[in-house]
Amino acid sequence: MRPDVLPADQALGLRQAFGRPGLTVLPVCAPGRDASSQAWIVNLAAALAERGRRTVILDAGPGLVSPALGLKARRELRHLLAGECTFDETVLEAGGGLAVLPAPRGLEMFLASGEAPATLFGAFLALPEPPAILLANGPVELVAPLVEAGEEIVFVASPARESVTGVYAAIKRLEQSFPGRVSRIALTGVADADSGDALARRLADATSRFLGHNPEFAPAVPDDVALHDAARAGRTVLAARPDGPAAEAFRRLADGFDGWRAARHDTPLEG
């Protein structure tokens, strides 16, 4: 078997054994401004960081990630690309191995340049303390170009009508413009297991019947008042209520993360 087709868990094991840096890239699309959906990426990132894996959120979304962590963005990727500041002056450290790199216009600017996404990921790997995981948050048109066919994108859906219709529309755009990518739907804010199963069946039926697309599903995160309280306080739910049901759900997601078909990069940018 060639090294470039090693199963993900074996490739990860080799990188760890030989001390070789590696970056896992996962695009996340949470359509709309639904609070539950927007909180999902923040808390997954926190759970991954809690497991000892430095995680950076590249945030090209509606600007809700930084406030959810009590952070205020002053610069973004656009300024970094223009050479107006350094990475350390741009990135927002949330503590515990978690950071946010705002990119409301910067990611679009990078893609418009024609540079290959591997260039951006190589720059992350060339940092003195490179992240192990990059979660790219934003609309599907911006995050889908970061991965190739066979690699996955996560769509976050809550029971809110806007969220469900937004996820369906985003997967439709993915199928039309970026065929071959794998979609995984992450459900959040569900009342109970039965409600989560019903929502999953609804989304699976709609995407299969009308789009010919069969998404995978991540384990659902239950509705938990601690999620909303934590967001209002600018904290993660893992910090605000570490023993609560939502925190435990995000830890389970983090534990299963390496089984997902996320993109992986190993080559630092030279020069």
Image (cartoon, rainbow, N blue to C red):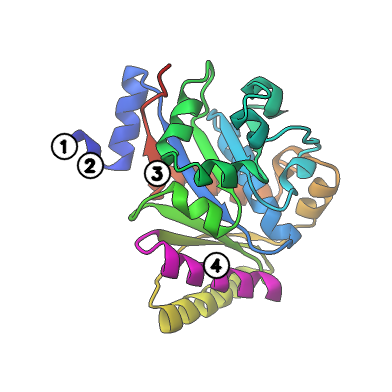
Q: Residues within 10 Å of mark 3 (few under 14, many from 20)?
A: many
Q: Is residue 259 left or right of residue 123?
A: left
Q: Earlier in the sequence, mark 3 or mark 1?
A: 1
Location of residue 44 in the rendering, given as x and y in whole percent from the top left corner: 60, 45
- Provide the residue designation for mark 4: 170
**Nearer to us in this view, 178 or 236:** 178
Q: Amino acid at mark 3?
A: Ala
Contact, CB < 8 Å: mark 3 with mark 2? no
Q: Is residue 98 left or right of residue 214?
A: right
Location of residue 250 in the rendering, given as x and y in whole percent from the top left corner: 60, 48
| Chain part drawn in magenta | 160-181
Dot 4: element? helix
Contact, CB < 8 Å: mark 2 with mark 1? yes
* Of the two numbered discs 4 and 3 in the rendering, the one whose residue sits closer to the viewer: 4
- Provide the residue designation for mark 1: 2
Q: Earlier in the sequence, mark 3 or mark 2?
A: 2
Dot 1: element? loop
Which numbered dot is residue 263? 3
Q: Earlier in the sequence, mark 4 or mark 2?
A: 2
